[in-house]
């Protein structure tokens, strides 16, 4: 590539500037809490030269941020080591024994009987009262549960509460209060894509393994496979999560729990870089109720739905860009049914895809705009409880706008 003298100066100047900016960005990103301190400022001169002269750029940069590459890596390593060492005493390996019924005539010799299988997951200390939090699916149908600590302590545990809808369970162990170190809980609502994540758990039985990555996405809505309801605001991370990590903490760079590792998306059954964690703010709502020996009750509207697509908008003669949650079906005698909400009686098939349409579209709840079905689920979980009365804003077939007042019920099974 040939450049004129002026263009070459600009080109070289740009490379130097971008390199300096990138280096500073990396260092700043690695300046963890308790890490690098700001120092007196100094002038840095970036030079780009060709045969015709020198181009200079002067800027002020904190002296302690001008580090050699090895210093940067050492800072990064030190921060990860610090998080691991501080949080490790609070992470547990959860061993589970489950009874598997063989049924009549299916045992050895044609006799009925039961087998026992071993399972394993992870968990973490919630408080000093002996409570451990893990996933519901880790301890589902457990006959016995044992938790193992990194210092070698191994204790029997009892499942005192569980919630299949959020895939959460609370265990209790008998241990002096001074012997438990709860993890600090962070704020999952404050997470941003790109922030550092750290997972500690027991993948494939490899006790107390740490992996790291970033927040790949926020606000996912995923099914639990143990319930007909979905979990909103789920955190997606590329930190390696594998079978055995379930129930363990997802930490931020300060060692605060921001999520509870729950599942992976993988064709192979092992980590493909797409893992999901239940947001800790949902656990903050639910776990205290489970510790109290009660079931957590979720508000229930009584619909199934989907976000709008271009195909549905066209089929319903609605303006492009219209947002909302399309009601697909309404449960009989549910709050939505009693309020007169309507499901979608028609199905459009395009390129092999089926799109229900023709039902009410929820565009707002309590004046809060609803972008799609995920947003509706999130609002109901975060802001409502059974018995609350809410006002829904609707777009009905043909474009008619309407409002409906709904008294929310409790999810079936709660």
Image (spheres, helix red, strand yellow):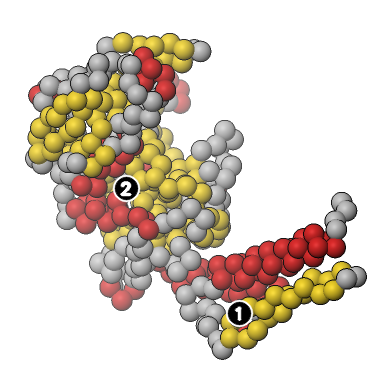
Residue named by callout 1: 61
Which is more toward the observer, 86 or 116?
86
Q: Residue furthest right?
A: 51
Are there few (<14), some (14-19), or many (20+) residues within 10 Å of tag 2? Answer: many
Work out which quarter of the rendered image holds the C terminus and state it: top left
Does any portion of residue 5 appear in the rendered image? yes
| Residue 60, above or below 17 | below
Res. 412 mark:
none
Q: What residue is shown at x 45% (from left), y 26% (from top)? A: 108
What is the tally of numbered marks visible in this picture?
A: 2
Are there few (<14), some (14-19), or many (20+) residues within 10 Å of tag 1? Answer: some
Residue 281 lies in quadrant: bottom left
Q: Position of residue 77 (x, y in %)?
A: 61, 70
Secondary element type, mark 2 = strand
Q: Position of residue 340 (x, y in %)?
A: 12, 21
Which is more toward the observer, 361 or 141?
361
Does any portion of residue 30 appear in the rendered image? no
Cα distance between the residues tagged 2 and 1: 47 Å
Which is more toward the observer, 32 or 178?
32
Q: What residue is shown at x 55% (from left), y 56% (from top)? A: 213
Q: Nearer the viewer, mark 2 or mark 1?
A: 1
Secondary element type, mark 1 = strand
Res. 168 mark:
2
Upstream in the sequence, badge 2 or badge 1?
1
Left or right: 149 as drawn, with respect to 58: left
Which is more toward the observer, 16 or 359?
16
Q: What residue is shown at x 61% (from left), y 67% (from top)? A: 26
Q: Position of residue 13 (x, y in %)?
A: 74, 66
**Contact between labelled residues 1 and 2, with CB atoms less than 8 Å apart:** no
Residue 129 lies in quadrant: bottom left
Q: What residue is shown at x 39% (from left), y 61% (from top)? A: 257
């Amino acid at each position: 590539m040939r450049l004129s003298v002026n263009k070459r100066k600009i080109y070289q100047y740009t490379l130097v500037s971008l390199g300096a900016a990138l280096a500073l960005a990396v260092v700043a990103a690695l300046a963890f809490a308790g890490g690098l301190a700001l120092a007196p400022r100094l002038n840095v001169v970036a030079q780009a030269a060709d045969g015709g002269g020198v181009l200079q750029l002067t800027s002020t940069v904190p002296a302690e941020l001008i580090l050699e590459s090895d210093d940067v890596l050492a800072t990064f390593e030190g921060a990860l080591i610090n998080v691991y060492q501080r949080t490790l005493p609070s992470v547990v390996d959860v061993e589970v024994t489950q009874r598997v019924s063989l049924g009549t005539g299916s045992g050895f010799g044609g006799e009925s009987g039961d087998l026992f299988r071993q399972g394993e997951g992870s968990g973490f200390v919630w408080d000093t009262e002996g409570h451990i939090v893990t996933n519901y699916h880790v301890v589902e149908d457990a006959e016995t549960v044992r938790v193992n600590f990194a210092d070698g302590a191994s204790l029997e545990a009892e499942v005192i509460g569980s919630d299949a809808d959020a895939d959460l369970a609370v265990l209790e162990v008998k241990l002096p209060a001074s012997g438990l170190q709860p993890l600090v809980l962070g704020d999952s609502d404050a997470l941003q894509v790109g922030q550092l994540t750290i997972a500690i758990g027991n993948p494939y039985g490899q006790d107390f393994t740490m992996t790291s990555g970033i927040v790949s996405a926020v606000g996912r809505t995923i099914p639990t496979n143990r319930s007909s309801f979905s979990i909103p605001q789920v955190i997606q991370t590329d930190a390696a999560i594998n079978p055995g990590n379930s129930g363990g903490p997802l930490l931020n760079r300060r060692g605060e729990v921001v999520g509870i590792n729950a599942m992976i998306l993988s064709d192979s059954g092992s980590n493909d870089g797409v893992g999901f964690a239940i947001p800790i703010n949902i656990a903050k709502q639910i776990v205290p109720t489970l510790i109290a020996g009660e079931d957590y009750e979720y508000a229930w509207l009584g619909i199934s739905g989907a976000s709008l697509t271009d195909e549905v908008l066209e089929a319903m003669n609605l303006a492009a860009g219209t947002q909302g949650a399309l009601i697909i079906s309404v449960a009989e005698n549910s709050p939505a049914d009693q309020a007169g909400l309507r499901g979608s009686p028609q199905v459009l098939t395009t390129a092999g895809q089926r799109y229900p349409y023709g039902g009410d579209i929820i565009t707002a709840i309590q004046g809060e705009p609803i972008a799609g079905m995920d947003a509706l689920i999130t609002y109901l979980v975060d802001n409502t409880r059974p018995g609350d009365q809410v006002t829904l804003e609707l777009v009905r077939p043909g474009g008619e706008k309407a409002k409906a007042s709904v008294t929310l019920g409790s999810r079936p099974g709660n």
